[in-house]
Image (cartoon, rainbow, N blue to C red):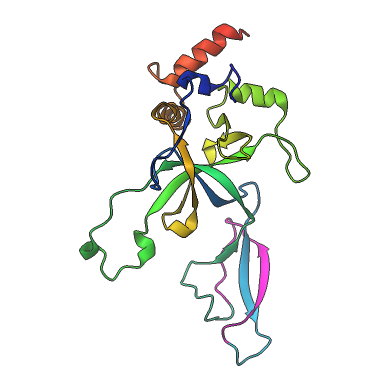
Amino acid sequence: MFPDDCPQTISGKSWWERSPDRVLHRGSLVFAFVPHFDQVPYAMEPVGRKDAEKHHEAVIRVSPLKTNLPLKPAELPVAAMPLHAGEVWTAYRAKKRPCLVLGTGAPAVNQDLIRGMPKTSTAPTVLVAPYYGVKKTPTRAGFHPEFVERIRHCEYRQFLWDHLPFPGGEESILRLDQLQPIGAHHDSYVLTDYRLSSVGVEFMDGMLSWLIWGVVRDDSLVALYRTVIEETFPP
């Protein structure tokens, strides 16, 4: 499944493995809806009602949301769309993608410490990074082969090449620079039967360290792989 010049060769044949349980782990492969980050978000503003007696319905104005412009208070209160000061309803295009779990949340907070607080203040989250398919399709731009090769050789700290293990899985690019939270509630994701092996998680930790600090640790698997690549594919 894996070519010779890819990070997965570092792990031998133990990059992906079947998960022995249905528990979320660091390295678990899930499906989740993630937004397209290259787009301008939209604000949804209630501006009127077709029926003045129906307070749960409203006519909505959708317009680009620009952070550098002052936020106007809602003109019309709608029961189904409550807003507090400084809040706005937003809309994004999103797509259900395979994602790698890189953080499974922090310890639960003692309920006595948050009594009376809104749930959003301490709601648990899961940190994931999304995968994008390499192959060009009628609905997908894909990636150029030369660019994919450079990613496969770990020339960029924000990308990682992989081949997803589930039936129908394909050559994909992991976007570590799109690390983001999703809700820890089971409705926020679909857990697959696959997760990274301990070697895969160790390699991913090296990539995250490189992404955040800008330095490849000398004792990391990432450093070992890049040394092998530089010796095999000299400039």
In the rendered image, residue 43, in percent from the top left (x then y), is placed at 61, 64
Residue 21 lies in quadrant: top left
Label count reads 0
Q: Residue at x 64, y 56 (%)?
A: 93
Query: Relative to the observer, which residue lies in front, 128 or 180?
Result: 128
Residue extent of the magenta highlight: 55-74
In the rendered image, residue 79, in percent from the top left (x then y), is placed at 52, 81
Residue 50 placement, left or right of 123:
right
Looking at the image, can residue 232 be seen?
A: yes
Residue 199 placement, left or right of 145:
left
Residue 52 lies in quadrant: bottom right
Question: Does 172 sit above or below residue 22?
Answer: above
Query: Relative to the observer, which residue lies in front, 117 or 129?
Result: 129
**Quarter of the image with the N terminus in it:** top right
Query: Relative to the observer, which residue lies in front, 193 or 215?
Result: 193
Question: Does 199 sit above or below residue 46?
Answer: above
Q: Residue at x 57, y 86 (%)?
A: 55
Magenta: predominant secondary structure element? loop
Q: Residue at x 56, y 39 (%)?
A: 166
Looking at the image, can residue 179 be seen?
A: no
Question: Which residue occupies the extreme bottom position in the image?
Answer: 53
Q: Residue at x 48, y 59 (%)?
A: 187
